[in-house]
Image (spheres, rainbow, N blue to C red):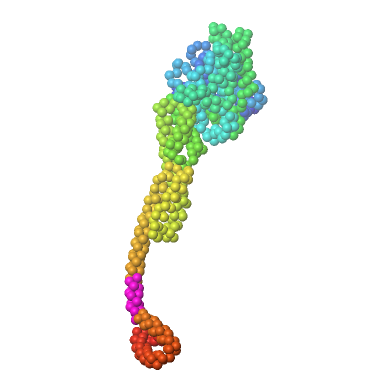
Amino acid sequence: MDMAPLNHMPEPLCLIENTNGPLLVNPEALKILSAIRQPVVVVAIVGPYRTGKPYLMNKLAGKQKGFSVGSTVQCSTKGIWMWCVPHPKKPNHTLVLLDTEGLGDVEKGDKTNDTHIFVLALLLSSTFVYNTMNKIDHGAINHLHYVTKLSQLLRRDTSPALNRVDDAADFVRVCPDLVWTLRDFYLDLEANGQLITADEYLENSLRPMKGTNQHFQNFNLPRLCIQKFFPVKKCFIFDLPSHQKKLAQLETLHNDDLDPKFVQQVAEFCSYIFSYSKTKTLSGGIQASGSHLKNLVQTYVNAINSGDLPCMESEVLTLAQIKNLAAMQKAIAHYDQQMGQKLQLPTATHQELLDLHRASEKEAIEVFMKNSFKDEDQGYWKKLEMQLVAKLNDFHKRNKEASLNRCSALLQDIFHPLEENVKQGVYAKPGGHCLFIQKREELKEKYSQVPGKGIQAEEALQKYLESMESVSVTILQTDLAVTASEKEIEGLREEFMKAEAQRLMQSLTQHQQMMEPRKTVHQEQVRLMETNRVYQEALQQRAMERQLQEEVKRLKERFQAENRQLHNELQNLLRNDSPDGTCILL
């Protein structure tokens, strides 16, 4: 029952009609797609007009005729034509062939139609055949690149639940495979003197060049995007099928009438499509049926008709803005990463920070140049420069703050003993200010020897010393006051000692004066003792001289009387002079 509609498609049917107005979807074609419950393999072919696209699609359908093969300069196919046939190698699968009108038809004044048809074929297909003439050139690459970008935008903005791509594997499943067919190929497949395959020729053509200037960017960007958008790529080359005069009847010619090499090339192409073309897959790994494909057709056509897909020129501008903004963000992220890895705050000098910034800035600009696209007025490059300057200013600020924080902590740690001494009054004494200055200079030297203080080392020290200046002044004033007080005390002490010395001298003089009578008494006593000695000698003489005894007796009596008288006088004298009234007995 699922295959019933195919029996009613003996020939292709217009799926999307391209008129001078909006694109029109053929209801009959949608009805056929709705009836297909099987998974579909969708092969769409796009390329310049008059490049033999219908011939290849007819071969894939297993028919000699079907899709219109024109023989004049007027384009035969308009819009997108569909032919649904049973898949020759995948049971229970339907092969949906989509032939598109030729690109670059001179009769079409508006190239927008070409873009719309190109985008639709790309979004609807699971295998996208890009059919061009002779060789792969930069124009063909650019055209394919622009359309892939447009299709990404259209897919993103329409049916998000149906078409969102969640991860890398999902992206590979959703994006179509690219088969690049080169008609009337006349080049030798050689590179560096070595034979190469058609696939290697495609790979070489899409390989980016090394360099970061605008020329290299313009060259590399389309190639990198194509490589990313088409994870699977294949290339086929076709020789001229027959003599030029016979090309007008190409669909009526049998293989015997064609160049055998061309016949073989077409057979290899068909075999690859049948064997390797994947089933149309939606996000989440859902295999699309005809009904799914019908929904995609309606969704994308409605989006294009509503103006969601702008003209090529404005879209290129939009793509450039998106690409350049992303390139700028990537460059800034690279700058942040490099500075984060290499910068240790605080730096010893401003120049050290500036050198790191310039090295990271250079790499960031290289990243931007590599990823930017058509930044012709250098607007985004200038914005990047402004942001990098702002980041440098921020790093200067953070570097200063880090240095100040480091120095403040260091100063507090080193000068803590000095502050404690001040609190305990160690320097509140004569000469204390000199001791304070000496200790401060020692700690300053210790501070200067510590590494890693950063650019604010001297300024932080000066601010700290300024904050301690009032303490220094107070210590100096205390020092002077204490010193003056001690000098005053010393002066008083000297005056006291002088007065005390004078008092002692007076006392000594008075004592000496008091001692004069005592000296007289003493001298008198000595004299009496000498007299007594003489008396004794006289007695001895009298004993010897008896004749003198009487005289001696008389003298003795007289002496004794005088002695008593003197003794009494002396006693009286002593009573008067002695403070306690004690008499000195002779």
Residue stretch in magenta:
501-518
Please give left or right for residue 553 compared with residue 282 in the image.
Answer: left
Q: Quadrant of residue 512?
A: bottom left
- Give percent across and percent down for residue 480: 35, 59
Q: Nearer the viewer, residue 278 or 402?
A: 402
Looking at the rendered image, the quarter that the N terminus falls into is top right
- Give percent across and percent down for residue 268: 63, 17
- Give percent across and percent down for residue 532: 41, 85
Q: Give me the residue at 47% from left, 45% from top.
A: 449
In the displayed structure, 428 sits above or below 372; it is below
Q: Nearer the viewer, residue 163 or 470?
A: 470
Q: Give me the residue at 37% from left, 90% from top.
A: 555
Magenta-drawn stretch, dominant element (helix, strand or loop): helix
Please give left or right for residue 204 compared with residue 362 in the image.
Answer: right
Say whether residue 509 is magenta: yes
Q: Quadrant of residue 479?
A: bottom left
- Give percent across and percent down for residue 493: 35, 67
Q: Is residue 244 visible?
A: yes
